[in-house]
Amino acid sequence: MTGVILLGLAAAVVWKLYQWSRAPHDAPLRSVTLCLLSAALSYPLAMPGGASGVDTVAGHGTAKLIQNVLLLLTVYFLMCFYLYSADERTGRLRARREALIVGAVAVAITVAALSVPHDVFAGSFSTADMTIPQIAFFYAGAGLYLMYALGVAGRWTRRYARMSRRPHATGLWMAAIGLSTMAVACAVRAVFVVIRWSGKTVPQPLMAGVAFLLVVSILLFFVGVTYPGATARITAVRLWLRRRRDHRRLAPLWQLLAEAYPENVLKPASSELWDRWRARGVHRRYHRRIVECRDGLVDVSPFLADASEDTEVLELPPAVLAHRLRHAVSTIGKGALAPRPAVPLAVPKEDNREADVRQLIAVSDALRLSA
């Protein structure tokens, strides 16, 4: 699970860095990119292997300090995204004020961490000696700022969720619940710090429950922000698979018509390698095949009926039309000229692209069965 999350964060960071390079003046995009980058850098430091490696080089507790500073930057840039999205001009002023706050908190917890011996600062939240004022201040200061920033971001997310439609609204509501739950968990942990600083103890199951709630809320937020994109990609994949299948089902009709009218087969707009590669995409081949089939049916229509049947040929069943198409292509191959004007064939009753494709597939399936 850890590897999947880290891989997802890395892919998101690379993609956002690419988008940012294309639009360097987009303030909301810059904020999202820096938010993801800070989160991606902090995540390995929360793992035992990453933390021990940094602590071995720089001293015990260094990884924890860097991780918490990166977490402060993560929620700060997340808040900046909403500030810039609401109004870039006023958002810039508010972001500068917020930068002073997060900078002051980062400096304060850094001073607190550096003012105690390294071995005292080592350990986790549940094992740290909160009776030491610097340790209590470190965890309380970072936690209170996280609570504040996450609460503001959660409020903005709820506001956007009310104005959005599905699936974006669904993802935003999940993200809002995740952010609000994280803020509540940070507030509870700050209360734990105060209790332990006073010399009292907090039951271990209670601290474990809050830690579990924090993990669940982070996962819920991650699912929420990826949900709209994931649903869009699933829809795109389904469309790609359906068009790939329909492209193959149109092959018998296309092959028959291309044999009679090879000039209707469309070629790439350019002979360059990039254009030829793009022309082989499923969507392009799908639309191109539909156009080629339609052009071929119009060209072959004069050979399908006698003059007395000109009106009836428009409503021929797919099986009958398939039989006449084979006979017409054979006639065209012998050099016969068109005996009458062309008319459209296999025209659907509904006026939309899906119905048009279904009609063509029906004729193509009839050709396949009669082969």
Image (cartoon, rainbow, N blue to C red):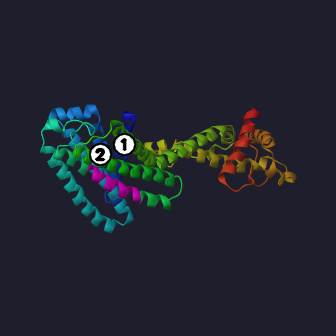
Amino acid type at circle 1 is: Val
Local packing at callout 2 (Cα closer than 10 Å; few below 14, some 14-19, many 20+) is many
Farthest residue, direction front: 200
Name the residue nearer the viewer: 39 or 113: 113
The x and y percentages for residue 54 are 20, 35
Task: Based on the picture, tell me whether residue 154 belongs to the magenta stretch.
Answer: yes
Query: Residue tagged by mark 2?
Result: 192
Name the residue nearer the viewer: 265 or 203: 203
Query: Chief secondary structure of the magenta span?
Result: helix
* Mark 1–mark 2 distance (CA, rounded to whole Å): 10 Å
Side of 69 where 11 appears, left or right: right
Helix, strand or loop status at disc 2: helix
Amino acid type at circle 2 is: Phe
Can you tell which mark lies on residue 298?
A: none
Name the residue nearer the viewer: 6 or 318: 6
Picture quarter with the C terminus: top right
Where is 250 relative to 33, above or below?
A: above
Query: Over which residues does the magenta segment extend?
Result: 142-155
> Which of pointers 1 and 2 lies earlier in the amino acid sequence?
2
Query: Residue tagged by mark 1?
Result: 210
Answer whether residue 17 is visible to the viewer in this image. Answer: no
Mark 1 touches mark 2? (CB < 8 Å)? yes
Residue at 24% over, 51% down: 141
Name the residue nearer the viewer: 313 or 221: 221
Side of 307 where 22 appears, left or right: left
Select label 1 or label 2 by which is in front: 2
Helix, strand or loop status at disc 1: helix
Task: Based on the picture, tell me whether residue 81 belongs to the magenta stretch.
Answer: no
The x and y percentages for residue 127 are 25, 36
Residue at 62% over, 45% down: 289
